[in-house]
């Protein structure tokens, strides 16, 4: 398969409209796309197409034990995709969506969605990136992981994504450099075990910032990080010892 790259770094509305339309058509065909987000570039596929999600995992060289989160274009979609969302989760997403916050909740049992070994959970995020949300509004929910081969640094430019993923992706959307100087990933907070929330991965939003909204928020990364602090410039996969399923691996 020959991939195509669409340059959306200019203010040309026609080129942008073409790129978004091609991305939508590619997703409908069950192909993978690469898109910019507010953190790093992500590789995305139709979250409701199990074959497409498997193509995403294959492209990264990643197993079903590390299922991708789902990016959505509107915060209101959490009600359709997650069940029994506790009030603390609603408060946190109201404060930090769109933004670099991923929340893990129970998946709606009626959903026909196979993301891997999720143990009945779903990780959701609304990116703070206008072009990404424009694409998501056209495609619907996308399973999205960071645009890199498993174990390698996440791409913060479209070219870095092309160099790692090549022809395993049909469409690359170049929105310019992503994520700012440090390109920190999103912070992951799990609401499936403790209603007050538990940080599974530290990222762009610090525990102190999140506790301004949720003072009782737990942090399962504290002891692991005190034993072996990660390199802040490293974007390879880092699993939380506290979980299987959505366990804090690499994602956009």
Image (spheres, rainbow, N blue to C red):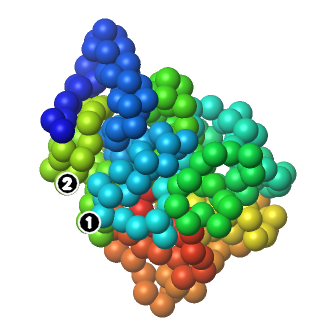
Instruction: Label 1, secondary structure: give it.
Output: loop
Q: Disc 1, disc 2: CB below 8 Å? A: yes
Residue 160 makes an appearance in the image: no
Q: Residue placed farthest to the bottom in the image?
A: 227
**Relative to residue 1, is residue 50 drawn left or right?**
right
Numbered tag placed on residue 164 in the rendering: 2
Above or below for 108 versus 236 = above
The number of numbered discs placed on residues in the rendered structure image is: 2
Tell me what residue is drawn at x 73 percent, y 62 percent. 191
Residue for badge 1: 152
On the image, which quarter does residue 34 sit in?
top left
Taking the spot 48% from the left edge, 90% from the top edge, the residue there is: 227
Residue beneath the point at 26% across and 65% down: 152
Instruction: State how far apart marks 1 and 2 are (Cα).
Output: 9 Å
Q: Is residue 20 above or below residue 225?
A: above
Of residues 48 and 40, the one nearer the viewer is 48
Q: Secondary structure at mark 2?
A: helix
Category of crowding for the residue at label 1, using alpha-carbon neighbours closer than 10 angstroms: few (below 14), some (14–19), many (at least 20):
some
Q: Residue at x 49, y 82 (%)?
A: 225
Residue 39 is situated, as x and y percent measured from the top left of the image, at: 41, 48
Left/right placement of residue 105 relative to residue 169 reads right
Q: Earlier in the sequence, mark 1 or mark 2?
A: 1
Examine the rendered structure and indicate whether residue 100 appears above or below residue 215: above
At which x and y percent is residue 182?
Answer: 35, 56
Q: Quadrant of the N terminus?
A: top left
- State the image coordinates of residue 44 (x, y, percent, origin top left): 40, 43
């Amino acid at each position: 398969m020959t991939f195509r790259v669409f340059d959306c770094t200019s203010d040309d509305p026609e080129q942008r409209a073409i790129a978004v339309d091609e991305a939508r058509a590619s997703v409908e065909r069950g192909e993978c796309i690469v898109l910019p987000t507010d953190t790093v570039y992500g590789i995305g596929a139709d979250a409701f197409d199990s074959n497409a999600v498997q193509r995403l995992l294959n492209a990264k060289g990643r197993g079903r034990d590390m299922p991708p989160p789902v990016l959505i274009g509107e915060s209101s979609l959490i009600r359709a995709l997650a069940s029994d969302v506790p009030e603390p989760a609603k408060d946190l997403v109201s404060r930090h969506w769109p933004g670099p916050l991923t929340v893990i909740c129970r998946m709606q049992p009626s959903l026909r969605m196979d993301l891997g070994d999720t143990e009945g959970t779903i990780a959701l995020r609304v990116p703070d990136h206008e072009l990404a949300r424009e694409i998501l509004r056209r495609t619907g929910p996308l399973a999205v992981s960071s645009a890199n081969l498993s174990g390698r640094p996440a791409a913060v430019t479209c070219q870095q994504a092309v160099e790692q993923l090549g022809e395993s992706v049909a469409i690359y959307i170049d929105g310019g450099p992503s994520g700012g100087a440090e390109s920190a990933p999103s912070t992951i907070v799990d609401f499936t075990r403790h209603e007050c929330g538990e940080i599974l991965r530290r990222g762009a939003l610090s525990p102190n910032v999140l506790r301004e909204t949720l003072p009782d928020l737990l942090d399962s990364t504290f002891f692991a990080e005190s034993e072996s602090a990660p390199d802040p410039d490293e974007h390879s996969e880092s699993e939380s010892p506290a979980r299987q399923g959505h366990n804090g691996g690499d994602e956009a």
